[in-house]
Amino acid sequence: MDAGRKSEPVNESTTAERKSGRELVIRRSFNAPARIVFEAWTRPELFTRWWAPKSTGMSILSCEMDVRVGGKYRLVFGHGGSESAFYGTYLEVTPASRLVWTNEEGGDNGPVTTLVLEEKGGRTLLTLSELHPSKESLDENLGVVEGLRETFGQLDELLVDLGASVGR
Amino acid sequence: MVQYTPSHFDASFAALSDVTRRGVLEQLARADASISDLAEKFQMTLTGMKKHVGVLEMAGLVTTEKVGRVRTCKLGVCRLEEEAAWIERYRQLWDARFSELDKVLEEMKRKEKAHGRRKKK
């Protein structure tokens, strides 16, 4: 009917924003109904197909999901020859709209992730929020601290090299 | 979980490719200095030194702070820039995942449609 409207370019870019000291928010829109997006997020055989794309250098070794309130998940992945796991507990499960889980691999006081799906005209706006117990925890998680250490380390090495090449 | 993107370090290495800028870093490793101190030490105009410091600043190797009329330079990483770089990497990680998710969703929709059609018959 309205061909012009159909060919309208859809904005499917991913945005990431630090909403507060403690919260990191990812947003993305999908050309699918919310129940399908929810399914792709909660069925292991579907989840494992998209969660570790090649560019991340990760591969999923196993994935278990007991998607109900109080149920556990455990995701084991390989990364450069070593194995790690992400695991936690589902706190809220509302099919096709909301999923909340803990991230316990870093200890008891890990962040809580909330997935919210809002459907509009067959499309779904996905909001993924990672709420940390403290600002320091998010800093640590973002690697800001580690990044600083690493950059300073590299700078130290460079300065040593430079000092040597100047011939002191 | 996240990997290093080379771009940040590319900027650092480009910044280090110049002999004056390497000298400035060496100088700042010994002590903080104002732009005019540095200009004088390297026998350069203020504008020229400002440019060099700007490159080092963009690469995250030097931070500057203006107090009154003096801009002091010190060795270090700008925290905000560092944080922005990490958030961008996190965004790229999810963006890559979501591109794959798009494919999975398309396939699920196709299957559902085919299934629906079969049901109707």
Image (spheres, coloured by chain):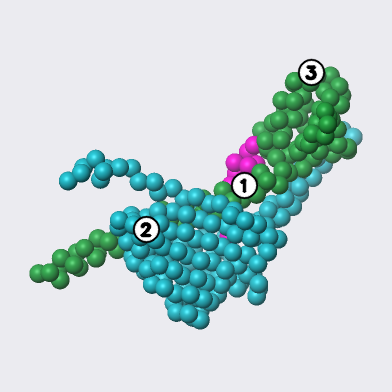
Chain colours: A cyan, B green
Q: Which residue is mark 1?
A: B84
Per the model, the C-alpha gap separating discs 2 and 3 is 57 Å
Q: Amino acid at mark 3?
A: Thr
Q: CA distance from mark 1 to mark 2?
A: 27 Å
Q: Are marks 2 and 3 on the same chain?
A: no
Is residue B2 magenta-colored? yes
Would you name the residue on which mark 2 appears?
Answer: A124
Distance from the alpha carbon under mark 3 to that under mark 1: 32 Å
What's the amino acid at mark 1? Answer: Ala
Labels 2 and 3 touching (C-beta < 8 A)? no
Left or right of A67, for residue A130 = right
Magenta-drawn segment: B1-11
Residue A139 percent location from the top left of the image: 67, 57
Q: Is residue B6 shown above or below A38?
A: above
Helix, strand or loop under label 3: loop
Q: Say if B41 sits above or below B94 in the image.
A: above
Q: Nearer the viewer, residue B51 or A10?
A: A10
Let me know if residue A157 appears in the view: no
